[in-house]
Amino acid sequence: MKETKKTDPRILRTRQLIRDAFVQLLQERDIEKITVNSIAERATINRVTFYLHYRDIPDMLEKMADDMIEEIVQALNRSPVDDNAQDGGYWPKMVQFIEHIAEHAEFYKVILAVKRTPIFMERLLILVTDMMEENLEKEGNNSFISKAGIPTDIAMWYVSSALFGTIIGWLRNDMPYSPHYLAKQFYQLLPGKGDKG
Amino acid sequence: MKETKKTDPRILRTRQLIRDAFVQLLQERDIEKITVNSIAERATINRVTFYLHYRDIPDMLEKMADDMIEEIVQALNRSPVDDNAQDGGYWPKMVQFIEHIAEHAEFYKVILAVKRTPIFMERLLILVTDMMEENLEKEGNNSFISKAGIPTDIAMWYVSSALFGTIIGWLRNDMPYSPHYLAKQFYQLLPGKGDKG
DNA sequence: GACTAAATTTACAATGTGTTGTATAGTTGA
DNA sequence: TCAACTATACAACACATTGTAAATTTAGTC
């Protein structure tokens, strides 16, 4: 996945055309109705060209999901802010994450909110779970979850899906709050954060 | 949807066969790979018989989702327990809901956890949101969310997806906790429930 | 400017889809 | 009881999509 080296611009161009075409089509119809034919047509490439890049549509979705995760990881590693400074009731990595989503809102809205596309949902939930797990470990035995004796697995199912679902709801409603504000509200809703504020 | 009257038993039989076949197939392969052919074969009915009940596979999913919601609503209305008695940190309707899912675990596990089937996810999230909304309204201005000044929409995205995701995680791990216990833990994790216990 | 990789064009076999026409079993009412 | 109607089941066909295989043109790299 190290595409830092010079890739043939024709390949990048074609992949971008396919990706844009896919996002467009997914806004218009359900994913089962998206054919290789329609993608090629919309992307103004030959249908055979599609097969030069992807085995079939499921393969395309998988590779696009790989790219998506890769891009998020890069965005989170860019300008590594102090992740311990939980100023004002939220943490910087969270804001960065939500900001990245906001920057690619059209893409994320259609794959997560308008049409729940399983592969993307799956991959993103794993990433979000890792994020929340990392945060919980940092709190250690001082966390509310620890003190309340709630099984860690239950707590993880809870907080990661809460974050994921909050972002989806926010996207579905065309992001009526700033990433910063959303992160702050989310932080306050977290278990045990009630009295601390 | 009032199927209380006598429906031709052959229809019920055929629908049940189709439903079972679908669940089986979804355990084995991705939904895009499930054809009308394969369903008919597995259900030991003629392929055309399928079309007498459903227009195509998307239509089948939609109708199955309708049935699912209908069945949950019926289960929740059966033996109307006192919904105000929030004894021990959870509410009865929640337990009933989780118990219903446990009773049909094979079905729910495959459509929600093993394969995230959008139509079912969508419909169930709406139902779960209604449940949580009803509960929040009951708390009124005394709720933590009210007092903390968190926008209601954000709070709803948060709590409903938290419940939904918790149940999915629980199903995915083959229900390692009792419905009653899970409901209790979930209740404790809710915003502002930290100090009350 | 020559070499090479990418994209296009055309063609074709295979599969899944959904329709049409028809047969059989079950239900209803005179 | 019988005839008409309805519901269920079956066989065969037309159609679109898929996946792949050539040969050719286009564009980027060195």
Image: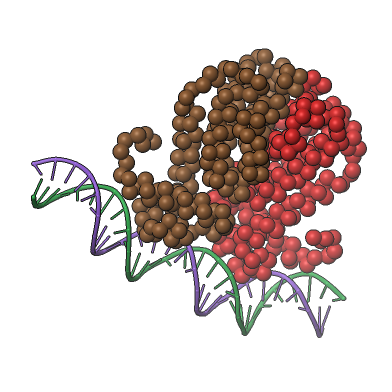
Chain colours: A red, B brown, C purple, D green
Picture coordinates of residue B39, whole percent (x, y): 46, 57
Asked whether, in this view, residue A90 is left or right of residue B7, the answer is right
At 81% across and 22% down in the image, what residue appears? A197
* Residue B161 appears in the picture as rendered: no
Vertical side of B66 occupied by A144: above or below: above
At 63% across and 51% down in the image, what residue appears? A23
Q: In terms of image quadrants, where is residue D10?
A: bottom left
Asked whether, in this view, residue B186 is left or right of residue B72, the answer is right
Q: In terms of image quadrants, where is residue D12?
A: bottom left
Q: Which of these two is toward me, B120 or B21?
A: B21
Q: Which of these two is toward me, A103 or D27?
A: A103
Numbered disc total: 0
Vertical side of A93 occupied by A120: above or below: below
Residue extending farthest top: B142
In what quadrant of the picture does the N terminus of chain A appear? bottom right
* Residue B14 appears in the picture as rendered: yes
Picture coordinates of residue A96, whole percent (x, y): 81, 40
Picture coordinates of residue B74, whole percent (x, y): 46, 31
Asked whether, in this view, residue C17 is left or right of residue A115, the answer is left
At 46% across and 49% down in the image, what residue appears? B19
Vertical side of A100 occupied by B137: above or below: above
At 63% across and 40% down in the image, what residue appears? B175
Asked whether, in this view, residue B174 is left or right of residue A7, the answer is left
Vertical side of C22 occupied by A79: above or below: above
